[in-house]
Image (tube, helix red, strand yellow):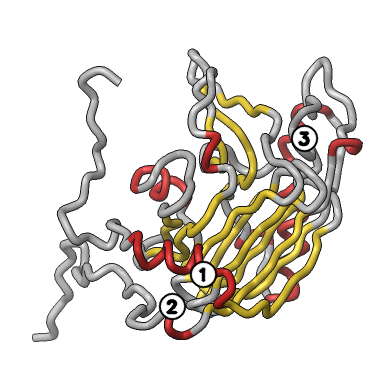
Amino acid sequence: MGSATTSYRPKASSVIDVGKDFYDRLAENTGSRDLVERFVLPIRSGRAWEVPAGHLCRVLTPEGPQCGDFNVWNRHNPRERLWASRTRQLQGAHVTRYDRLWSTLPYLRPLLTITNDSLEWYGVDEDGARVHDLLGSRCDPYVNRILTGEDFDFHCHSNLVRAVLPYGLTEFDVHDVLNIFTVTGLDDEDRYYMKPSPASSGDFFEFFAEQDLLCALSTCPAGDLSVPFWGPEARDPVEVCRPLAVEVYRPSPELTGGWSTPPRASYQGLHGITLPVWS
């Protein structure tokens, strides 16, 4: 990296610092948790679900590699949602165990903390790619129309739109995603690329809900990304599409003792604006 240094470096004891012992206990004591919900998302579909604060959620690949596009909001206030670009700056363009997903302004606090990741071993490959990325956005029917001249209603954006409708949200609430199980990077010309997912049957990505969450997930219509979805060699990759599963757990109270939902960012200024005074 030469002489470049990371720009966003916190002071000691910042909220960015993670108490690893706490999250390790949550990850390791799988016998001290109760399963409260489990469901399977079919291929090319989406679903939304709630994860109460203090609970764990695990996304799994039950039948082999499959990429999933993930959105998350504060359950009680959808204006507080994943801020992908700030999370890239505070954590990294790809996330794994101990990383957090951060919410939008003016809240700017952790939505969740990643507690376990069976693909943590992947690291950085020979092309400089990593897994679980915040670089790319979701596929959508608008860019598909631009690239192909055709309409397709099962892109991740559309799957997420349909998923959140029962919760009173709309297309305007769907936002840039965390691409779970997806391997990506930037080439020498700084262009985005994707590679086949390294996940196998039973791999998982697990997180701890730092607040009451509404989550949504799409089983990407490109499946495991081993078949080109756009371009001169593109074909329908339905044969490499597989389901994803979601499990929500309630950990035993002794594992979460002393924990509380992080407060919103403490800045209470008026951005330099002086309020008018009646005279």
Residue type at mark 1: give it: Asn
Nearest to the observer: residue 229 or residue 239: 239
Image position, residue 157 (x, y; %)? 71, 50
Q: Is residue 242 above or below residue 12?
A: above
Question: In front: mark 3 or mark 2?
Answer: 2
Residue type at mark 3: give it: Asn
Q: Which disc, if any, is residue 255?
A: 2
**Quarter containing the C terminus:** bottom left
Q: Residue at x 50, y 64 (%)?
A: 28
The reply to whether the C-beta atoms of the residues labelled 1 and 2 are less than 8 Å apart is yes
Q: Earlier in the sequence, mark 1 or mark 3?
A: 1
Element type at mark 1: loop
Q: Residue at x 48, y 77 (%)?
A: 54
Element type at mark 2: helix
Residue receiving disc 3:
144
Q: Which disc, if any, is residue 29?
A: 1
Q: Is residue 69 left or right of residue 128?
A: right
Q: Residues within 10 Å of mark 2 (few under 14, many from 20)?
A: some
Nearest to the observer: residue 214 or residue 119: 119
Q: Residue at x 31, y 63 (%)?
A: 19
How far apart marks 3 and 2 lie (CA) works out to: 46 Å
Q: Is residue 129 left or right of residue 37?
A: left
Q: Earlier in the sequence, mark 3 or mark 2?
A: 3
Task: Give the image quarter of residue 274.
Answer: bottom left
